[in-house]
Amino acid sequence: MILGQLAMGIFPYVPGLHGVLSGGTGGTNEARYCYSIWLRHLVHAHRSGLTPVPPAVVAELGPGDSLGVGIAALLSGPTRYHALDAVRYASPDANTRILNELVELFEQRADIPGDKEYPRVRPRLDSYRFPSSILSDELLSTSLAHERVRAISRAIENPNGAAEGNGQNPGRSGFLTYHAPWKDDNSPMTSSVDTVMSQSVLQNISDLRPVLSAMLKWLRPGGIMSHEIDLSAIGRAREWNGHWRYPALLWRLMRGRRPWFLSRRPHSAYLAMMTDTGFRVTLDLPVRRASVLRQQDLASEFRNMTDDDLTTCSVFVQAVRP
Ligand SMILES: C[S@@+](CC[C@H](N)C(=O)[O-])C[C@H]1O[C@@H](n2cnc3c(N)ncnc32)[C@H](O)[C@@H]1O
């Protein structure tokens, strides 16, 4: 039994996790995925009435295989993008390839890749049409100007350089910083960021409170954070929520020496932590899924779980720094 569970932890069997097995992290090695993720977060932020949309300064936690989500952001208006990861996965070559493909997608005003192409990706949208009411032709003619795209390309080759130039064209490297592993020491980002986002990342952070505090500090008052959080076992168990069956010791063995691993927090724990940190949660969009497991089937530390937590497999949360 224990050996079987360990094997499941070591060899996730869900199709689509080959990226993880081959040393990658998931989706951001595809430009269409990056385009889709950025636009989904943007559309939701716009719908919530959060301003400014598009934001001027964006930070992303855990970009993974490329900085493509942030590059998609830069191509739609923002003048700064800060990437913060636990591990340096993204390379200038991958970022440059993704940049070129993203420019084409924006130039074509391509529809947002939706449920047929990415059936497991959340948050979903009511419409996957290109959001022209947010990204007007006028805005895109500036954000996709040849010189500006060349400057973004140079910043990709040399991130973390000193910012130069003006706000619209920050110059050689001012568009982009990439810190991996990142540390929150006297960050120049303090009170400067309009939007902090992440896609399928927060569930992997075991010590989340200091990370939430860092995000609160980076945001300007009124700035928002926007996170898609996968609450499922992501292939580490037979049942979609079977990760809550494993006793803590076994889970630690399964983690081994990996730099990050599923934290197993349920839905309500995220909302409580965000509120405790000082955020005002403005959007809580859970996805429910039937559970064949009952509370008594779970490991002792999860047996008090509410029905809501037991049946919530992912959540999209947006929260404001008051
Ligand atoms: C499942 S991958 C998701 C990657 C990408 N966001 C995507 O949508 O494909 C999880 C990412 O979270 C990152 N991560 C884990 N712990 C982190 C932390 N404490 N701070 C920042 N990133 C972290 C990992 O390094 C990895 O890049």
Image (cartoon, grey):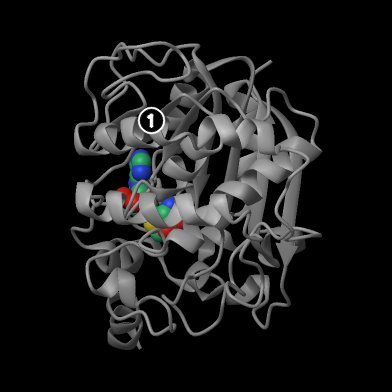
Q: Where is residue 13 in the image (x, y as percent from the top left)?
A: 39, 85
Secondary structure, mark 1, is helix
Which quadrant: the N terminus?
Answer: bottom left
Determine whether 260 is above or below 138 in the image: below
Q: Quadrant of residue 230?
A: bottom right
The residue located at (75%, 60%) in the rendering is: 308
Q: Of residues 48 and 146, which is closer to you in this image?
A: 146
Determine whether 38 is above or below 32 in the image: above
Determine whether 193 is above or below 145 in the image: above
Determine whether 237 is above or below 80 in the image: below
The residue located at (71%, 44%) in the rendering is: 43
Q: In this view, does 59 lie to the left or right of 65?
A: right
CA neighbours of label 1 inside 10 A, class few (<14), some (14 to 19), many (20+): few
Q: What amino acid is labelled 1 in the image?
A: Glu
Q: Position of residue 186 (x, y in %)?
A: 31, 11
Q: Is residue 118 left or right of residue 243?
A: right
Q: Name the residue under label 1.
A: 147
Number of numbered callouts drawn: 1
